[in-house]
Image: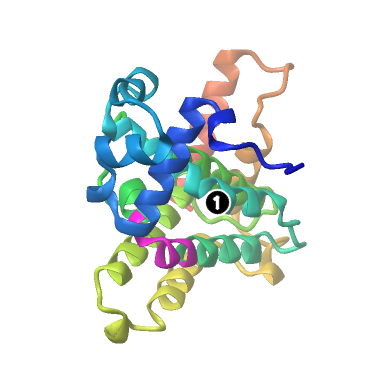
Amino acid sequence: MSGNPSKAEVDPPERILRAAAEILAADGREAVSTRAVSARANVQSPTIYRHFGDMRQLLDAAASRSLADYLATKRSRPHTDDPVEDLRTGWNTHVEFGLRNPHVYTVLYGDPRPGATPQGVAEGEAILLGLVRRIAEAGRLRVGVERAAAMMHSACRGVTITLLSTPAPERDPDLSAATREAILTSITTGAETADTTGVGPRAVALKALLDPPPAALTAAEVTLLAEWLDRLTARA
């Protein structure tokens, strides 16, 4: 007896999600129509809207599903002793995912809508913040955690979209690495200077270590301390 459930045994929402993800990966977002998804998932059109609201929400969910394996890989990979190297690896994996899954990537990152971030993108940003926070805790971050994460995310996303927009034979094979290293140089210190850095990286490290804030401080004290640390970081 087979261990895999038949299509009929899988719940309609799961069938719909799988169908949309398969169509998206193979043929692009324009191919993810109500008719195509209904036929592949063996459901009626109203079922799609009942579970996902509209086709845009279904597209986001399908793309996030395709990104799930990638996110699982990032979570399962053990951290090294070098948090900067771990961030470098995360950048490489992100770009690689985009180039291997262009249709999925453009749905997730090529059509930004403030206030409507796909779940997969939000989870990826949380992972990035965690990687950057480890660098801060090691005393090797020159700027604040949020600023550093935003710089990395913006640059990595921009590089990936640029490469996807360029015919494969014309792509600069060194663009990703060159951009990555330029950003890392601007936001991190070298491992050999981590213990002798100035006030800026130390302020960043202390702020990272105070998340979550200690019970010994009141909310007002935490806010004031964070403001002081941000000032020290900005003026370093």
In the rendered image of this protein, does residue 174 appear above or below residue 220? below
Q: Nearer the viewer, residue 12 or 234?
A: 12
Is residue 79 left or right of 98 when viewed as pictured? right
**What is the crowding at mark 1: few (fewer than 14 residues within 10 Å), some, or many (at least 20)?**
many
Of the 4 image quadrants, the one containing the N terminus is top right
Secondary structure mostly taken by the magenta-highlighted segment of the chain: helix
Q: Which quadrant would residue 95 be assigned to in this image?
A: bottom left
Q: Which residue is found at the position 71% from the left and 23% from the top?
A: 214
Q: Give the range drawn in magenta.
A: 96-103
Look at the image and say whether residue 101 sits in the magenta stretch.
Answer: yes
Residue at far front of view: 1
Residue at far bottom of view: 169
Q: Which of 32 and 157 is in front in this view?
A: 32
Q: Nearer the viewer, residue 76 or 138?
A: 76
Q: Which residue is found at the position 36% from the left and 21% from the top?
A: 47
The image's colour scheme reads rainbow
Q: What x and y, as percent, mark residue 10? A: 57, 30
Q: What x and y, as percent, mark residue 192? A: 71, 71
Residue 209 seen in the current view: yes
- Mark 1 = which residue? 200
Q: Nearer the viewer, residue 224 or 179?
A: 179
Q: Which quadrant would residue 115 be assigned to in this image?
A: top left
Q: What's the residue type where badge 1 is placed?
A: Gly
